[in-house]
């Protein structure tokens, strides 16, 4: 089911191993490469966010609420909780006539380390706006306003908006619904898919025109990809891998992390494809390394782009004195094709 993906070394000695599975697919669902079992069922967590934004766009939300690239990127984000993210989430809510109290995602300290430190230094407690999912929830509330759906119960699995999200995700992924679901960290439903189907969904995000989907869904996917590619800081935050990957490639590779070791990438070229990764133990420290090695082997990153992302590729491991004592490195020679 799982294959070696990465290992932690200490002084050149292998100390810890991370196993997982990877699927790479075309927008039409043709498998391109794999590690481990591509039929593995995985819970997408926040890697589902680009697809959870589809009902808002399909209902005309972009025009109704004057949404720009940064707005839509935040709707798809696991953001760092910085001032720019908080302000934009508040603005989104306001455009639908909602206040912060409408958010049902809960509060946690900002995901970004410097952002959390700045908030603590001011003696301020985090609010739901600092939750990394506040943009997604604001987008869901706007969809409810636009579709005249009850906002108070917007997170219930049986709510028409959540049912529609599940239907759209299944269609983009090329699988029969209804999808199995669970409750995410932000209390919204999250969805389970075979790894290969999730890769197909990300491939459709990379090249909607090649996907076997209705024109309106292809258009919404293209708008999501363009927004995320144009506003990388909104998708994650300063110093974080996802924003760095999108920025370094000019939006040609659009990544999205999910909790518990899930990561999806929509690669627009040179060959359009989707990648979905699951690290078996749910650990996230090796994720950046594995994603970059996958993209390198797929020929999806230039030498200059790899150089720009070098800090994430083999991150050094330091001890309590700050001494470099090891690194995380890829542990697979080549993808099976």
Image: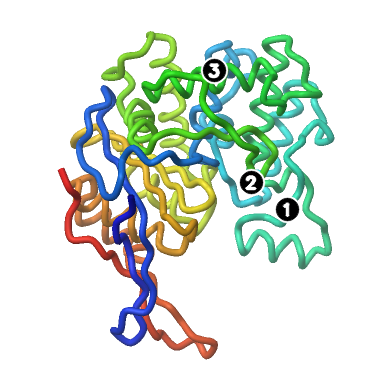
Label 2 and label 1: CA atoms lie apart by 8 Å
x, y (%) of residue 51?
A: 49, 27
Mark 3 or mark 1: whose residue is earlier in sequence = 3
Quarter occupied by residue 314:
bottom left
Q: Are marks 2 and 1 in contact (CB under 8 Å)?
A: yes
* Residue for point 40% across, 85% down: 325
**Which residue extends farthest bottom?**
321
Residue drawn at (63%, 13%) of the image = 64
Q: Distance between the residues labelled 3 and 1?
A: 28 Å
| Disc 1 target residue | 108
Residue marked by disc 2: 132
Figure quadrant of residue 214: top left
In 3D space, how far apart are the residues under numbered discs 2 and 3 (Cα atoms)? 21 Å
Numbered badge on residue 58: none
Q: Where does label 3 land, which residue? A: 57
For label 3, the SS is: helix
CB within 8 Å, label 2 to label 3: no
Graded by Cα atoms within 10 Å as few (under 14), some (14 to 19) or many (20 or more), the crowding at tag 2 reads many
Secondary-structure class at tag 2: loop
How many labels, in total?
A: 3
């Amino acid at each position: 089911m799982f294959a070696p993906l990465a290992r932690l070394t200490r002084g050149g000695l292998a100390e810890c191993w991370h196993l997982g599975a990877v699927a790479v697919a075309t927008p039409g669902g043709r498998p391109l490469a794999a590690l481990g079992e591509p039929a593995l069922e995985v819970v997408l967590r926040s890697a589902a966010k680009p697809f959870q934004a589809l009902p808002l766009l399909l209902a005309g939300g972009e025009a109704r609420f004057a949404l720009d690239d940064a707005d839509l990127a935040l709707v798809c984000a696991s953001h760092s909780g910085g001032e720019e993210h908080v302000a934009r989430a508040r603005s989104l809510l306001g455009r639908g006539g909602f206040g912060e109290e409408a958010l049902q995602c809960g509060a946690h300290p900002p995901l970004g380390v410097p952002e959390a430190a700045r908030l603590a230094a001011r003696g301020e407690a985090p609010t739901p706006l600092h939750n990394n999912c506040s943009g997604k929830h604001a987008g869901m509330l706007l969809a409810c306003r636009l579709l005249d759906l009850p906002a108070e119960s917007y997170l219930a699995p049986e709510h028409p908006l959540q049912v529609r999200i599940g239907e759209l995700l299944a269609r983009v992924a090329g699988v029969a619904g209804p999808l199995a679901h669970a409750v995410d960290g932000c209390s919204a439903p999250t969805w389970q898919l075979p790894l290969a189907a999730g890769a197909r969904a990300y491939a459709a995000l990379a090249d909607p025109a090649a996907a076997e989907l209705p024109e309106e869904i292809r258009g919404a996917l293209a708008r999501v990809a363009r927004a995320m590619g144009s506003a990388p800081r909104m998708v994650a935050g300063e110093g974080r891998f996802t924003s760095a990957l999108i920025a370094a490639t000019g939006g040609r590779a659009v990544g999205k992390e999910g909790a518990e070791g899930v990561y999806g990438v929509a690669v627009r070229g040179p060959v359009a494809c989707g990648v979905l990764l699951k690290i078996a133990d749910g650990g996230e420290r090796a994720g950046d390394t594995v994603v970059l090695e996958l993209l390198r082997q797929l020929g999806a990153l230039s030498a200059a782009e790899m150089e720009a992302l070098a800090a994430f590729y083999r991150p050094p491991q330091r001890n309590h004195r700050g001494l470099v004592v090891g690194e995380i490195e890829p542990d697979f020679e080549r993808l099976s094709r």
